[in-house]
Image (cartoon, rainbow, N blue to C red):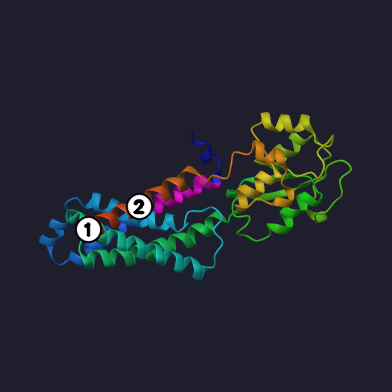
């Protein structure tokens, strides 16, 4: 049920989202104190149900960011693009909060508090994102990947996934040549297989082996791969690895067997849940806001 949590990048994104949820909730607390620190009575009155109000505020903003794809593992964008995307997410979240406060007045926090909380939350989330992106770029935090193959198929990883954003979720340790296969990758990245494969995997602390040989017939070290699998190392096909890490399917590598045995092109359960929640909440808010107009139009047509 929670197989997607086995991936280290997904676990980091989950921690990422939970931390931002706490930052957004804390921003509403801070906004309350900044707004009412001179008025003790107002401060005490506003403090009632503050944890619930903070959770609602943080959840709606987080939902807006998730709907814009802020929690995708392969989001390629510049710093300016990230700021613009986050600003749009906060605008959407703010509008949803305003509509929600209109529908549920008991959750209203005041225009001043809401404005201050949005500004503080925006700055806090952006600062945390910059810090977090620097942290996850540390090589020791990424899964170590060994590519089995040095031919044209394996070289596509080196040629098509060269940018740092492409390799944010993994580190390529090297390429192991298959018997009789050409060397199409830079020689400095080739690892000589002068020891058993399982020994090399343990020595280099490999987390995943990607099978990318040009011709598998009689060239795969099946005994070594089986020993690595028994040792807990993940074995992945090149097409599956590329689709998972880049979010695209390379048609030139595609084989009918991959379509048969593939688990499909579905997003992670977390992404599907966040998108579905955003759709339901936005549709409900708009329905509650527009039902008088819809009723009037229906009556006008009927009469």
Residue 30, numbered label: none
* Residue underneath mark 2: 22
* Residue underneath mark 1: 101
Q: Report the predominant secondary structure element of the magenta stretch.
A: helix
Q: Which quarter shows the C terminus? A: bottom left
- What is the magenta range? 9-20
Residue 77 position within the rendered picture, expressed as x and y whole percent measured from the top left: 54, 65
Is residue 59 or residue 140 the one in the foreground? 59
- The residue lying furthest to the right in this view is 180
Say whether residue 25 is left or right of residue 15. Answer: left
Residue 283 position within the rendered picture, expressed as x and y whole percent measured from the top left: 33, 53
Q: What is the crowding at mark 2: few (fewer than 14 residues within 10 Å), some, or many (at least 20)?
A: some
- The residue lying furthest to the left in this view is 41
19 in the magenta segment: yes
Label 2 and label 1: CA atoms lie apart by 21 Å
Say whether residue 5 is left or right of residue 208. Answer: left
Rendered image quadrant of residue 54: bottom left
């Amino acid at each position: 049920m929670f197989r997607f949590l086995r991936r280290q990048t997904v676990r980091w994104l989950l921690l990422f989202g939970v931390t931002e949820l706490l930052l957004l909730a804390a921003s509403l607390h801070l906004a309350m104190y900044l707004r009412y620190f001179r008025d003790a009575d107002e401060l005490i009155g506003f403090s009632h149900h503050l944890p619930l109000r903070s959770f609602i505020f943080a959840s709606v903003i987080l939902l807006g960011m998730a709907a814009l794809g802020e929690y995708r593992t392969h989001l390629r964008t510049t710093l300016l693009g990230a700021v613009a995307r986050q600003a749009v997410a906060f605008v959407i979240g703010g509008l949803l909060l305003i509509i929600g406060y209109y529908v549920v007045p008991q959750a209203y926090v005041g225009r001043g508090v809401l404005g201050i909380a949005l500004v503080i939350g925006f700055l806090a989330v952006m600062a945390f994102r910059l810090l977090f992106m620097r942290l996850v770029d540390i090589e020791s935090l990424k899964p170590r990947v060994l590519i089995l193959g040095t031919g044209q198929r394996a070289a596509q990883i080196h040629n098509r996934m060269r940018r740092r954003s492409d390799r944010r979720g993994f580190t390529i340790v090297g390429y192991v040549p298959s018997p009789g296969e050409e060397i199409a990758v830079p020689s400095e990245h080739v690892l000589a297989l002068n020891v058993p494969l399982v020994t090399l995997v343990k020595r280099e602390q490999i987390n995943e082996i990607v099978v990318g040989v040009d011709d598998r017939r009689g060239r795969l070290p099946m005994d070594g791969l089986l020993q690595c699998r028994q040792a807990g190392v993940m074995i992945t096909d090149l097409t599956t690895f590329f689709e998972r890490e880049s979010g695209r399917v390379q048609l030139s590598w595609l084989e009918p067997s991959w379509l048969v045995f593939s688990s499909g092109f579905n997003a992670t359960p977390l992404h599907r849940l966040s998108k579905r929640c955003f759709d339901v909440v936005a549709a409900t808010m708009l329905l509650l806001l527009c039902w008088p107009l819809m009723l009037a139009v229906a009556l006008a047509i009927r009469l």
